[in-house]
Amino acid sequence: MSAYTVAPLEERDLAEAAGIEKFCFSHPWSEETLRSEFGSPYNWFFGAHADEKLIGYCGMQAVAGEGSVFNVAVLPEYRRQGVGESLVIELLRKSKELGLDQLLLEVRPSNLKAIWLYEKCGFVFFGLRKNYYTDPPENAIIMRLAFNGTQMYEDDDDDD
């Protein structure tokens, strides 16, 4: 397993983040889109670095007590090493710091590994968005984590 660190994403990381998007999504965000979202005071992004290389990133928006996860993306060769979980944990910590009531996300029903990760971190099924995804067409599962003390993920540092 490669050693990596997770920290707030920096503007200089946006080109690499756009490259990761191309590996992970059928409709990747461009560097320009990432730059636009990165500049918003309502958005937060975190990156995972190994040997000064961006290997994964995530982002969320927080408005009026509610957070929405944009993307959680990890380069294929770094998956199944805890990178995605570490990124989600950073989103949860930021959500708690911001005093959010809940955090929502959409995920493809076919993305069982992501669903498992989100459930491990405390997210639960919340609803369905019909025909949300294209290439290939698919519904989206809406998952929710409520910060009411009963669903907050606790990082016990035992499993890494």
Image: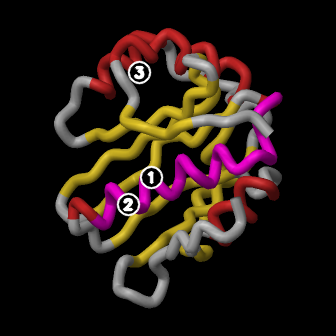
The numbered mark, 1 or 3, whose residue comes first in the sequence reads: 3
Locate residue 74: give its quadrant.
top right
Q: Tell me the element at label 2.
A: helix
Marks 2 and 3, how far apart at CA: 22 Å
Q: Tell me the element at label 3.
A: helix
Across and down, in percent, residue 8 comes to 37, 35
Which secondary structure is most common in the magenta stretch? helix
Circles 2 and 1 in contact, beta carbons < 8 Å: yes
Residue depicted at x 80% and y 47%: 80
Residue depicted at x 61% and y 46%: 132
Residue depicted at x 45% and y 89%: 150
Across and down, in percent, residue 70 comes to 47, 42
Circles 1 and 3 in contact, beta carbons < 8 Å: no
Instruction: Give amino acid for label 3.
Output: Leu
Q: Which residue is mark 2?
A: 93
Instruction: Give amino acid for label 2.
Output: Arg
Marks 2 and 1, how far apart at CA: 5 Å
Does the magenta portion include 140? no
Range of residues picked out in magenta: 77-96
Instruction: Give amino acid for label 1.
Output: Glu
Q: Nearer the viewer, residue 19 or 79?
A: 79
Marks 1 and 3, how far apart at CA: 19 Å
Question: On screen, 113 above or below 155?
Answer: above
Question: On screen, 30 above or below 138?
Answer: above
Q: Which residue is mark 3?
A: 34
User: Which class describes the residues within 10 Å of circle 3: few (<14), some (14-19), or many (20+)?
Assistant: some
User: Which class describes the residues within 10 Å of circle 2: few (<14), some (14-19), or many (20+)?
Assistant: some
Say the numbered circle drawn on residue 90: 1
Across and down, in percent, residue 17 comes to 53, 20
Does the magenta portion include 90? yes
